[in-house]
Amino acid sequence: MAHDGQHCSFVLVADFDIDKGAQLTYQFPQPLGMDEGLLANLMLPDGAERQPADWTVFFLNQTPFNTIKPVLSWDNEDGGEAVEEDARMLYVINLVRTKLDKTARRGAIVKAMAICTRYPFVQIFKPVLLLALDDYFMNPSQDCLARLFDAVNAMDLSSMPTLSRYEKLIMRSTERQDVFIGRYDDFSALNDPGTATQQTAPLPPAVRPGHKSSNSGDSRVSYEDSLHRARKDPGRNGPESYKSASQMRSPTTPSEASFSLDGSAVWVGDESGLDQMGFVATAASASTTSIASAAQTRGRRSTDASSSSSHGAYGRLGENAPSLTGAATAALKDSHFFHTAINYNEHLLPVKVPLSTFPEEVGEGSLTMLCTTFSPTITTMSGPMHPHLHTNGSLTPPVIVLFNALVTGKRIIFLGHHKLAENVSNHVLAACALGSGCGVVLKGFIKRAFPYATLINREEWENIPGYIAGVTNPIFEAAGSWDLLCDIGTNRLVVHKDIYSSHPASWTPSSNQLIMRTGTLKAESSVGSEEEAVRVQTKEGGPAQKPESAGRPDSADNVFIDDILAAIASHYSEAHVRAKFAEYALRFVRVASRYEEDLLGSTTIGYPSTTYTERPGEKPRLGSGAFFTDDTACTKELAINAGRIEAWRRTECYRLYQADWKRSLARNPIQGFDLAHQLSRLRYAKSISDGEAELIFRTLAECLHSYDQVTELLSWLPPHLHGLQPLSFGLFHQQEVVRDLAVDLFNELRAYPIGVQFLQALNHFQRYAYVRQAHARELRLKDPNTLAIPQSAYMSRTPSNRSESSLGGG
């Protein structure tokens, strides 16, 4: 995101007049040139006079009716990835307060103040808005607006690092507080403004209070894991295979003292202590004193995992790496945020700017809150079942019904009668994050979202296709201009009784027959699948009620939501929940790509579906496309998803993803093969031939030549999917060439601080295998007559009894 230009574009003030109603009092520094009555009513929500304080969020330059007239200089957001119309969006955070005053006609004064900004993380302006509105109550003049405007725009973001897409994906998936610390030009940027840095040793990596760390030992499963768990795959390893390093003890051996396997360092060197190659440790896991001491006593070269410059090639160790003095002597803060301050009226307000936000993530919408509000145990669902919405019949979880409604472009209303407008707004913003895969996968939801909507311009926003609106007035439920009603006050999900009139379940013979690679197979339908929804036409051709269907309690969607709710109950972080939903949305898109290919013969949203081929006289070729454990699983998953895929392909969201996919093919650092498919093969395949294993590891090792390529690879290996574990399988392969390629791959990762952090998350057995083989490799390079370490020397130490003739996570 570009940081030049104004942080605050406009400041607005509205007052409630008992005779005239909501009035827009001030617009600073100039009028917006749009309907002032609309702005005033958005800033003063229904029932504001009954609440001491409330917040609303709304957008400008979103549609023709809320486009402002002044021509501003807009920076292209997200490094040029955002489309032009999205870059013009203005996000508005508004505070309304009611103060009791006996001199007022109704005993209270209601005023509101709003900041219009081009940053989606509008929540950072809440503290300064609180002070500014108090100031305005005491002195209601335009000077208050000018002070606020100047203070916000004086906020210093000049040294704020700009992360690439893949750096953002890595940052949001880890709770390590020192991730990408080297992206800061000045380590003092991590300190609270004006705070003296007297601490001589860095703080250990902290986990948010009350939350579990999402590390490589995370016991939660991914969405693809849930697919296999739902099928009760007997070949899948149990959770005991994924214990974190802190939960496992390294085997006691005479050479144990030669290695640091305590979770804080990756040691590579001669286990006899005669030859030293080097070690890597992070400033967050050992003090500068202990690092220097270890380097001195062991005679090893030490390199800090977080030492790096802020340039594109900064990450390679030894290349212009800055000194650790600043980091080691500073009280380190969470590097997920840029720490700055707003100096308002002699009050220095600390500000934490999130660095991994995508444009579809606005404000403080929480998926944890959304899943809790519409948990299957407390949510009542009513109305007809529809193939676009109910992918598992009547047992479709409420959150999945909402996700289906979002991606298929249904009109959605969040109703909060007698609720704060802030509560309603946050649910709408959370729904946008849900549908977009937290901004990582899909786009177009914020463009049609109205976090707080009013009766004033009802006809205009109701004409937006697939709107997502938050309201507090129950008159909207009675009006019926919606397809799905989400009542946050009573935990209801209501599908409109006339949804078939608005969205017919139009099925063609081609969409009812999935053309598979093995021939023309009719899609197997589970109870509650889309095939039953075909029979919704009456003899006259009109819509009719779909027969009641029980659904399957063990479907992948149900297992996935059960896992999400279990994670929430165990106090897993919001970042963990978001990572799971991003993966869910990505899986939906990859399955849609396969569906599109089977239906039309080609796809415009993904790689073609192929399998690994190895023919005599021909060069072997890696597979690509969505991964399925077998043809039966593929057929069932396509049938279950067919209804919502068909509807999604007719939406603007689909067309935006088409354009994004085309751009990614040209821009991705790793080119020429489907990286996600290869990692899925390593994670979930029941067996992989020696030839495919060698080609996968050779291709990965040969493609890693730059920092950008490393970050792209690591972005597909998040902690909640056990990090580098799929690649570590290569260390235990029966063929030496595969083991050597795995060592080459890890050596390349080890050259970058972010790669070191991922290596540190491996368990003891995986790191021990890497250390032994890397050391043996060094000895062979020095003395070609040196024998390689026998495979039995480390295979007996592995936590898995996987057959030597196979390689995979299944």
Image (cartoon, rainbow, N blue to C red):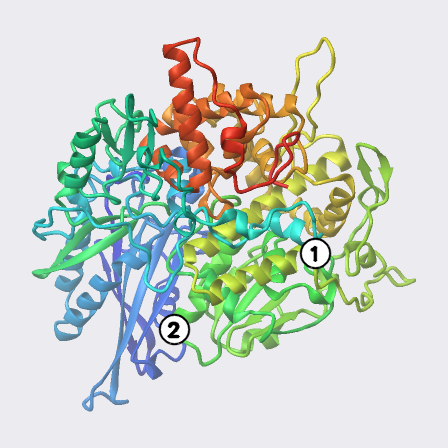
Q: Nearer the viewer, residue 90 or 777?
A: 777
Tell me what residue is drawn at x 70 percent, y 49 percent: 233
Q: Is residue 284 above or below residue 206?
A: above
Residue 785 in picture, x, y percent from top left: 44, 9
Tag shown at residue 612: none
Quarter location, residue 265: top left
Q: Is residue 570 above or below residue 265?
A: below
Looking at the image, is mark 1 or mark 2 earlier in the sequence?
A: 2
Residue 517 in picture, x, y percent from top left: 79, 32
Tell me what residue is drawn at x 9 percent, y 49 percent: 197
- Which quadrant would the N terminus be assigned to in this image? top left
**SS of the residue under disc 2:** loop
Q: Nearer the viewer, residue 324 or 170?
A: 324
Task: Please give the residue where the numbered disc 1 appears in the rendered image.
Answer: 388
- Residue type at mark 2 is Pro
Task: Please give the residue where the numbered disc 2 appears in the rendered image.
Answer: 45
Is 603 on the left-hand or right-hand side of 184?
A: right
**SS of the residue under disc 1:** loop
- Which quadrant would the C terminus be assigned to in this image? top right
Residue 569 in picture, x, y percent from top left: 48, 67
- Number of callouts: 2
Of labels 1 and 2, the one closer to you: 1
